[in-house]
Image (cartoon, rainbow, N blue to C red):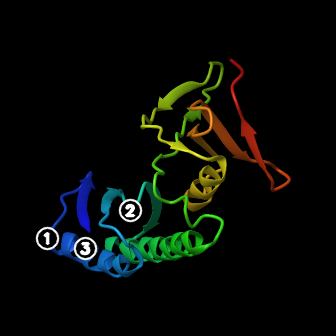
Amino acid sequence: MQVIVNGRHMEVTDALRGYAETKLKRIEKYLLKPTEAIVTLSVQKYRHNAEILIKVDGFLIQAEDETEEMYSAIDKVMDKIERQVKRYKEKLQDKHHKNSGENIKASPAQLGVVEEEGSLPKIIKTKRFALKPMLPDEAVMQMDLLHKDFFVFTNAADNRVNVIYRRKDGNIGLIEPLV
């Protein structure tokens, strides 16, 4: 597994880098193909934040956590990642998704909006990503793995951009464009 450790507002020491890499080796046994893991460590005042993004077989698995100490933040985020990787492996073994995990690759688009008093909302964050074709069922699986309420993907059936979202009643909605 290729591990990239980045620091935001801090210098990443060799000890921190080694600690993160050692922790990530715990989950290698659950992953079949070589993957890439990006660890981002940041400090803001007394808050130490650890975020991990793992790219595995076209899926993205992400978690972040914040504590008062960097090593415990890494431990907590690794616990979350390990649960998600186990869930990913279980879903791939499910008969319904067994053959569909080979050509999936996408990441969620998130748009952060903040409203200031007396003005219109402003776009404060933009994410760009490549849309790879997938079936709606695969997109639902990806949305669940990322713990998001919506997911943007290219529908493999018609090659159009679609959005799936979690409805308030717990079901899933699909938005398809009319052309």
Circle 3 Cα neighbour tier, 10 Å, few/some/many (<14 / 14–19 / ≥20): some
Tag 1's secondary structure? helix
Tag 2's secondary structure? strand
**Side of 150 relative to 173 (left or right):** left
Q: Nearer the viewer, mark 2 or mark 1?
A: 2
Q: Where does residue 118 sit, x and y in percent of width and height?
A: 66, 19
Q: What residue type is labelled 1?
A: Asp
What count of labels does the image hold?
Answer: 3
**In the depicted structure, whether residue 54 falls above or below residue 14:** above
The residue where tag 3 is placed is 21
Q: Which amino acid does label 3 sit on?
A: Glu
Marks 2/3 in contact by CB < 8 Å: the verdict is no
Residues at marks 2 and 3, CA–CA distance in whole angstroms: 11 Å
Label located before the other in sequence (2 or 3):
3
Circle 1 Cα neighbour tier, 10 Å, few/some/many (<14 / 14–19 / ≥20): few
Label located before the other in sequence (3 or 1):
1
Q: Which of marks 3 and 1 is in front?
A: 3
Q: Nearer the viewer, residue 83 or 1?
A: 1
Q: Which amino acid does label 2 sit on?
A: Ile
**In the depicted structure, whether residue 12 falls above or below residue 126:** below
**Side of 8 relative to 110 (left or right):** left
User: Dividing the picture into quarters, in which one does residue 98 lie?
Assistant: bottom right
The residue where tag 1 is placed is 14
**Side of 4 relative to 43 (left or right):** left
Q: Where does residue 124 sit, x and y in percent of width and height?
A: 48, 31
The residue where tag 2 is placed is 52
